[in-house]
Image: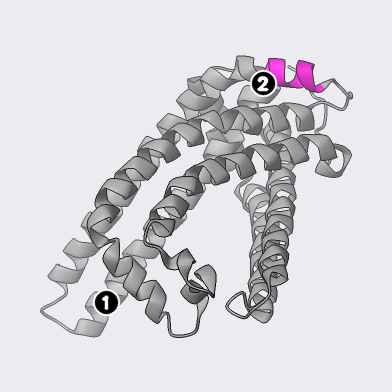
């Protein structure tokens, strides 16, 4: 197995840009039905246009939501179906970025995406297993939390609430750990061309051997992403698209895309960290 160290995303700007472009295109496709649904209410026919939806108080936004209430269940169902399909398709650029970061050689994008497509079936299978495990943990967490709250309901409400919150927090931590293991497994699929089961075991082994390093590798880009989102929200609030001026809308859109692009780099830094953790700790002990 190759012991080559992964490279920094700063050395793969084109790979990160393609990753961003694919997600931006998927988000655009997913948002178009919602845009059409809201536009069908006629809110854009007012002189102020859809700025009314963003006015303080949300009176117009609430009225539009009320008019769309009967259409929301079917709309959400269609969005879930489309979102699931897009999530599977987006594993291709995700795997391509992992391939790009795993090699220190500057390959062509055709070669990178060709290798990525060969890894996609195992990546999809591994992701499905991880999603199933996360769903089971969530179900068990909610069940346990409800049981604890009912069991302690006869003592004090505060104890029951604390037990409920503790169970939920534990479940959230387990779901997060499974997500990190999933990403480590994906890194193992790309680095060593493993099947989904073997890669998942490699991810578990790496996480069990170096939990702190794995968590810090994920947490640092995650905190940077939270800071970027908060900064973007502050800028969007200051620009206030509810006020006249089309330039405000375009500038807010630009801010959103710049934040999204920066978040892709945050994600790429975690992918590099996951490749390194798997490289050092993912192989079985001799």
> What residue does disc 1 label?
161
First to last magenta residue range: 109-116
| Front one among 270 and 57 | 57
Mark 2 packing: few (<14 Cα in 10 Å), some, or many (20+)?
many
Mark 1 packing: few (<14 Cα in 10 Å), some, or many (20+)?
some
Secondary structure under badge 1? helix
Query: Would residue 167 be seen by someone viewing this image from the given angle?
Result: yes
**Side of 151 where 22 appears, left or right:** right
- Tell me, yes or no, whether the highlighted magenta stretch contains residue 72: no
> What residue does disc 2 label?
116
| Front one among 281 and 24 | 24
Q: Identify whether 248 is placed above or below 25.
A: below
Residue 9 percent coordinates (x, y): 81, 42
Q: Dividing the image into 4 quarters, which one contains the C terminus?
A: top right
Query: Would residue 282 be seen by someone viewing this image from the given angle?
Result: no
| Front one among 61 and 215 | 61
Q: Identify whether 92 is placed above or below 268.
A: above
Residue 201 percent coordinates (x, y): 52, 28
Residue sitting at the far left: 154
| Colour setting | one colour
Q: Dividing the image into 4 quarters, which one contains the N terminus?
A: top right
Secondary structure under badge 2? helix
In the rendered structure, which disc, 1 or 2, sits on the residue that comes first in sequence?
A: 2
- Residue located 28% across and 71% down the image: 163
- Tell me, yes or no, whether the highlighted magenta stretch contains residue 112: yes
Q: Identify whether 58 is placed above or below 2.
A: below
Mark 1 vs mark 2, foreground winner is 2
- Residue located 56% across and 45% down the image: 28
Real-space Cα distance between discs 1 and 2? 47 Å
**Side of 284 where 141 appears, left or right:** left
């Amino acid at each position: 197995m190759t012991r080559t160290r992964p490279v920094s995303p700063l050395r793969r700007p084109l790979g990160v840009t393609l990753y961003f472009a694919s997600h931006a295109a998927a988000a655009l496709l997913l948002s178009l039905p919602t845009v059409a649904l809201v536009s069908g209410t006629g809110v854009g026919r007012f002189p102020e246009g859809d700025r009314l939806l963003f006015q303080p108080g949300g009176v117009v936004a609430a009225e539009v939501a009320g008019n769309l209430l009967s259409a929301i269940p079917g709309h959400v169902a269609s969005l879930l179906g489309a979102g699931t399909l897009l999530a599977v398709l987006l594993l291709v650029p995700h795997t391509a970025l992992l391939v790009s970061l795993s090699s220190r050689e500057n390959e062509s994008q055709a070669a990178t995406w060709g290798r990525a497509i060969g890894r996609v079936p195992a990546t999809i299978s591994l992701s499905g297993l991880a999603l199933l495990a996360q769903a089971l943990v969530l179900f068990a967490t909610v069940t346990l939390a409800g049981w604890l709250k009912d069991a302690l309901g006869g003592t004090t409400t505060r104890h029951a609430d604390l037990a409920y919150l503790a169970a939920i927090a534990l479940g959230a931590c387990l779901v997060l750990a499974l997500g990190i293991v999933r990403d480590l497994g994906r890194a193992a699929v790309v680095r060593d061309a493993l099947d989904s089961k073997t890669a998942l075991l490699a991810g578990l082994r790496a996480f069990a051997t170096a939990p702190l390093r794995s968590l810090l590798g994920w947490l640092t880009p995650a905190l940077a992403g939270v800071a970027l989102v908060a900064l973007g929200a502050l800028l969007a609030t200051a620009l206030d698209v509810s006020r006249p001026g089309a330039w405000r809308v375009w500038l807010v859109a630009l801010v959103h895309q710049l934040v999204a692009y920066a978040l892709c780099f945050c994600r790429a830094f975690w992918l590099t960290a996951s490749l390194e953790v798997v490289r050092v700790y993912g192989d079985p002990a001799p």
